[in-house]
Image (spheres, grey):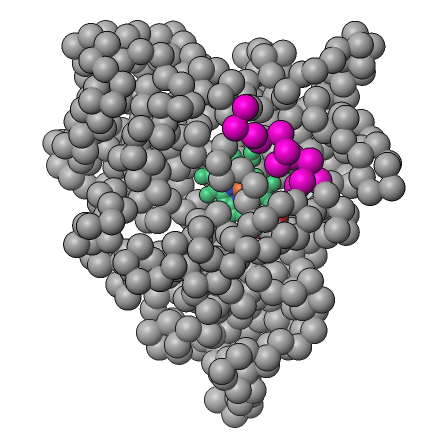
């Protein structure tokens, strides 16, 4: 009896606990069922005729987050077929209105300052990484002035200095990298291109002093800053999680490195330098207010981070595309030999203009692999969509996806084909922007406070965005990517490891899309390799 009681006591407790658990389970299941049923009913019964159609979804809050997140371009394409160019979906509980095509790009990217706002969306992610008082942690008018300061440093004279710096960085990297030792080999290319990008960008934009620190402390610190850009941080940017603690430590440390450098340069009484830090140190806001040192430091971080992901992803795609089309890699090599001479002398900025296929490689790669697939804006006043009955309310977020028109058959024949020669005027694959629509030079220009920029209102090809938030790094990126490509092409031949023309898929898990990894290619030194 006593023994039975000893056993039965805990058993009956366990059964009653099990009973409680199953009651909780039933309650949760019923709650979910009711939530799903109400959500579905609401979508059918309460359609708002003045709002764009809502993408059907089963679960509230989650909405279409998962299908969008797995493959945004496919999500846009499929829903455009179902709902048209303008539709709304639920992204983490937020009504997000996508408007694709040139009209949509224009509506969102050239939206008026009273109607659309970028900083409200991005600040949670960028301010802990860049630091206070710059980019999205200040009024838009201040950002426009900051973009002017940054852009002034990106002149033709500066680019003339950058080409030899970038060439030397690539050459030295290839010489010392264990992955490129010997006559041939196989290499996972994206991590190599990430390193080449940071070395070339930091040296060109921030000077040798800062570049050298990337061999020591700065590479790890920037890596920790990078972790702050994971999409989960749109929600958890504030949380005292390990990666956020490392992000905050890295931000303080990197900013201090820049601020110490600024102080040293002032103390030295340096004059006449051309690098960006020097320009920023000597810039003044309206009313003759000098830019404070901490803002110079934070802009330096922002500049390097803004370019790093986009350029690194693009250079990886270029190499992967060349490995899938060795014939084009040969054409590039021959273009250099023809334009610059068989001895392939050191590259200059002026040489780049003689290499149109090199420019087309970058252009075509950005058409298919633009690293920024979604550009978002908060809606500040209800926005009527011209030519429709829709008015976008202020509780929606707007999402532009210029990649959709860049891969639309209406503008680009055989849109999925990577064919750099389509950018030649007489090519049968030439985009309609070259054939029918005015070239960018004839397009309407506007000055938001950082120089004239094309509105791009008619263009289906906008990898660098448009409007007041348009990229200021486009020319730098082109110089950097063409120079990196030229140096690699003159030294190596690439092909896919299996000899096929396949290209790896895209990783959309981080904020900027990039090739899935590992992405291995086979390389072989050219005869007369200069390394
Ligand atoms: C903005 C793309 C390289 C600095 C943008 C935007 C796009 C873009 C699409 C607009 C974002 C928006 O409207 O919300 C690219 C691509 C690059 C590249 C595809 C390379 C292939 C660079 C580089 C730098 C840079 C190298 C710096 C040297 C900036 C800055 C902005 C910007 C400062 C302005 C952000 C704003 O005004 O809100 N970029 N970018 N980018 N980019 Fe780039």
Residue 413 to residue 290: above or below: below
Q: Which quarter shows the N terminus?
A: bottom right
Residue 114 to residue 414: above or below: below
Q: Position of residue 272 (x, y in %)?
A: 70, 15
- On the picture, is 175 further left or further right than 44? left
Q: Is residue 91 visible?
A: no
Q: Position of residue 438 (x, y in %)?
A: 38, 59
Q: Which quarter shows the C terminus?
A: top left
Q: Position of residue 40 (x, y in %)?
A: 49, 83
Magenta segment, which residues? 146-157
State which image quarter holds ligand 1: top right
Q: Residue at x 61, y 71 (%)?
A: 396
Q: Position of residue 359 (x, y in %)?
A: 33, 36
- Asked if residue 156 lies in the magenta stretch, the reply is yes
Residue 150 placement: quadrant: top right
**Residue with the most extreme front position:** 442
**Residue with the most extreme bottom position:** 45
**Residue with the most extreme left position:** 499
| Residue closest to the eye, 279 or 77 | 279
| Residue closest to the eye, 174 or 506 | 174
Q: Residue at x 62, y 45 (%)?
A: 451
Q: Residue at x 36, y 30 (%)?
A: 353
Residue 312 placement: quadrant: top left
Q: How many numbered callouts?
A: 0
- Asked if residue 451 lies in the magenta stretch, the reply is no
Most frequent secondary structure within the magenta stretch: helix
Q: Residue at x 69, y 62 (%)?
A: 113
């Amino acid at each position: 009896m006593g023994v039975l009681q000893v056993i039965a006591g805990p058993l009956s407790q366990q059964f009653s606990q099990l009973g409680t658990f199953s009651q909780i389970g039933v309650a949760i299941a019923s709650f979910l069922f009711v939530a799903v049923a109400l959500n579905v009913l609401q979508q059918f019964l309460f359609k708002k005729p003045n709002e764009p159609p809502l993408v059907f979804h089963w679960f509230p809050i989650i909405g279409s987050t998962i299908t969008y997140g797995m493959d945004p371009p496919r999500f846009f394409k499929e829903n455009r077929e179902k709902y048209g160019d303008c539709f709304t979906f639920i992204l983490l509980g937020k009504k997000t209105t996508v408007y694709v095509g040139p009209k949509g790009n224009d509506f969102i990217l050239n939206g008026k300052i009273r109607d659309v706002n970028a900083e409200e969306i991005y600040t949670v992610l960028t301010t802990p990484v860049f630091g206070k008082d710059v980019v999205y942690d200040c009024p838009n008018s201040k950002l426009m002035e900051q973009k002017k300061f940054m852009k002034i440093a990106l002149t033709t004279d500066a680019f003339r200095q950058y080409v030899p710096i970038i060439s030397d960085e690539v050459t030295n990297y290839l010489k010392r990298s264990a992955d490129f030792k010997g006559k041939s080999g196989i290499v996972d290319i994206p991590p190599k291109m990430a390193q080449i990008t940071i070395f070339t960008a930091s040296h060109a934009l921030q000077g040798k002093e800062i570049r050298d620190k990337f061999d020591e402390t700065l590479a790890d610190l920037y890596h920790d800053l990078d972790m702050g850009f994971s999409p989960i941080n749109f929600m958890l940017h504030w949380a005292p999680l390990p990666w956020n603690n490392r992000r905050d430590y890295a931000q303080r440390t990197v900013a201090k490195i820049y601020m110490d450098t600024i102080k040293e340069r002032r103390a030295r009484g340096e004059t006449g330098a051309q690098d960006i830090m020097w320009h920023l140190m000597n810039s003044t806001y309206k009313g003759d207010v000098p830019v404070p040192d901490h803002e110079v430091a934070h802009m330096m971080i922002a500049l390097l981070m803004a370019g790093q992901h986009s350029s690194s992803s693009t250079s990886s795609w270029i190499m992967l595309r060349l490995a899938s089309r060795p014939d084009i890699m040969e054409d590039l090599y021959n273009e250099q030999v023809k334009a610059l001479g068989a001895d392939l002398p050191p590259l200059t900025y002026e040489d780049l203009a003689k290499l149109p296929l090199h420019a087309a490689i970058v252009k075509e790669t950005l058409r298919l692999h633009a690293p920024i697939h979604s550009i978002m804006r908060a809606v500040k006043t209800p926005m009527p969509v011209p030519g429709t009955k829709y008015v976008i309310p202020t509780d929606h977020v707007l999402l532009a996806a210029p990649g959709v028109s860049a891969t639309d058959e209406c503008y680009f024949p055989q849109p999925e084909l990577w064919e750099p020669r389509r950018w030649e005027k007489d090519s049968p694959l030439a985009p309609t922007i070259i054939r029918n629509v005015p070239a960018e030079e004839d397009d309407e220009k506007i000055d938001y406070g950082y120089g004239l920029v094309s509105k791009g209102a008619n263009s289906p090809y906008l990898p660098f965005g448009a409007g007041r938030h348009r990229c200021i790094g486009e020319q730098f990126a082109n110089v950097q990517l063409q120079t990196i490509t030229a140096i690699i092409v003159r030294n190596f031949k690439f092909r896919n490891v299996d000899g096929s023309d396949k290209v790896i898929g895209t990783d959309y898990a981080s904020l900027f899309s990039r090739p899935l990894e590992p992405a291995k290619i086979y390389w072989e030194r050219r005869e007369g390799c200069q390394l």
